[in-house]
Amino acid sequence: MDKAKAGADERTHERLKHARLITEHQMEEALDRQKKTGRGLLDILMQDLSLKTAKDLLTYEIHLSKHPEPKQLKEVMVESGWVTEKELEEALSTESKTGLAIGEALVEKNVITRMQLGKALIEQERTGHSLWRTLINLGFANAKQISDALRLELPSVAVKHRKEYIVEGILSEKLIPREKLEEMVAESEKSGKDFGELLVSNGLISSKELARILESEIGVPYVDLSTYEIDGEVVDLLPESFVRSRRVLPLRREAGKLVVAMLDPKSVSTIDDLRMISGRQIDAMLAIGSRQLDAAIDRVYGKKEMPPAKEKHGKKPVVEIGKEEVRLDELVESVSVVNLVASVIEGAIHSEATDVHLEPQEPEMRVRYRIDGLLYDVMTIPRNIEAGLISRLKILSNMDITQKRLPQDGHFSMEIGGETYDMRIATLPTSLGEKLVVRLLNPKNVFMGLKQLGLDAEDYAKVDSLIHEPYGLFLTTGPIGCGKTTTLYAALNQINILTDSIVTIEDPIEYELPGINQVQVDYKINRTFANTLRAVLRQDVDTLLVGEVRDVETAQIASGAAVTGHLVFSTLHTNDAVGAISRLAHLQVPHFLISTSIIGIVAQRLVRKICAHCREEYEPGDAVLEETGLKGKIKPGTRLSRGKGCSYCYHTGYRGRTGIFEVLMVNERIRELILRHASEAEIRQAVISEGMRTLFENAAEKVKDGVTTPEELMRTVRGG
């Protein structure tokens, strides 16, 4: 390779890597493809940039080592020879304040019609809402379709020179006379048809010859689906609706990866979704053509499609397939619905999701996974099987499938990968249908110990001493979903010895704890927290866990139990540790009882951890430190860490979560302040002076240690 060209490639790679637009893994793949194809490294790298909108991508500022001022990526792109200034102007011209680029992308993908776009623009002018919100409000598109349309791809070198590559390949192999080839080029330019498909349709080359040329162009092997034997076991890994809408087909498993045929094997968004749903790394192969791919999908999944379900007077709900009528209960047991339920649940587990949201929208149901605390769109479910999917889950959970006007709760278990997972199901009637949330209870979390929660050595020692006290009230506080119950389970596991009697009162029981007596609250029969707590105190109990102190009676009984020889664990919803004292007072617990019963409070949050596979160091600017409150807490020149985004973290830069904590130890000084009704500010000042680190300070330490990022600190904790 020419030295100058190699130098330019290396500089471009370093700039893109510094801008967090490619990963080391992508670079390794690009180098491997370069060796196999002989193509320029720059050409290969540029194909992978499709994760950002044009506006965000082009205005991204890169700090170059020999330049005092940062440069925008669009300047670097022109200098590197990636695109010309004219091409950049064309790309930017579609980015208007009205969001017209979104509408044009949806029209081009046949999601909406041009008439619908016109109506949406008129409505947007009237309401002042963004175009994407207007399209959703009018029912013309759903959130997933909008999200996919926003992934605007800039013209990469390979795409721009697609025709040239095909011409060069044909001439080198002497497949078509030059004169005829020039005639086809002219016809393609005149008609606007794809050059490759035009050659095949005119019988000048075969689809296999075209595939071989394209394989050389993009560095992805092709597969002939007309003769390929597809592994039947992998078909269930992807829902049929996803396969048909995204034009993909699972082929086989190979060394822990899923091999998939795709019309567009460079679609990063589709590969991300495939990885999330299947829980496996993806090896993409090029499908020769859309007709062949559609035929293979029909062969594997079948040709029948079900229209929307109808209600008939005096009969059970039915769907019509051709001229046949199928009852809803038959649809629920159909192979397609059973497989779809299994694939949705398995995909969530492989993605390490905590919840699955099934949300009725127009025109299709949306499926989202909550991963590391945030929701991600995964797929849509067609209307024709939405009722069967919901009913299937309700039957598994022992719910009434005929009751659609009231919320219901249930649970079921499913064995996946040798592990039994418990699912907690909750339904909610909405104007568009039943919304259903599945909480996935991972059995691995049951036996988590305190050391696995993210406590540092000092806070761990404090908590360990608190949970080994003979009696007293130990509280964990924070918002919903911050890991309070997990912390209490870990504490119980730490003290679960054969000589103690331990009882929990929960609503609901999330995990079965061996050796511990667990009671489920049931308000229908008046088995409340307070009533059950009274009964438990007559059971010669040493340690008890009350799932949540949510009313006056429970608060008073729990506090009283803590001063009569019982160790009581419970949770409260407060913003910080000191707030728990005020909360108990608001629940009419006398201050003398609070001061004598409470021994310690742990406030906590969950922050996302930086992905270990794409971690990189960087020097934060003053603006970042100022905005996050870290200025003055981090020395100038300190290098922090962040994730660049890779296939392992779905290009988020984060993978997994850990806790941040503040541990309040109640000593004599704090008891005196509680007794004289001191304010929260006064108590907070006292506990900080005695060594308690706040949530913010604990999070700041994790930022400095490279566990999480300043942005994640801002998302979960406010103030210094």
Image (tube, rainbow, N blue to C red):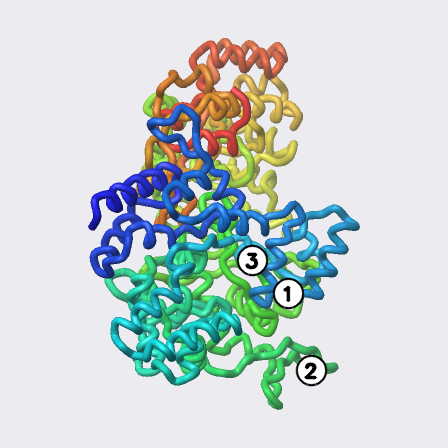
The residue indicated by pointer 2 is 315
Which mark's residue is nearer the viewer, 2 or 1?
1
Picture residue at 29% right of the left edge, 62% below the top: 219
**SS for callout 1:** loop
N-term-proximal mark, 2 vs 1: 1
Choose between 573 and 362: the one closer to the eye: 362
Give the Cα distance between marks 2 and 1: 36 Å
The amino acid at mark 3 is Lys
The amino acid at mark 1 is Ile
Residue 496 seen by the camera: no
Which mark's residue is nearer the viewer, 3 or 1?
1
Q: Badge 1, how many Cα within 10 Å: few under 14, some, many 20+? A: some
Picture residue at 66% right of the left edge, 67% below the top: 113
Residue at the far right in the pictured view: 126
The residue indicated by pointer 1 is 112
Choose between 330 and 397: the one closer to the eye: 330
- Left or right of 636? Residue 257 is left
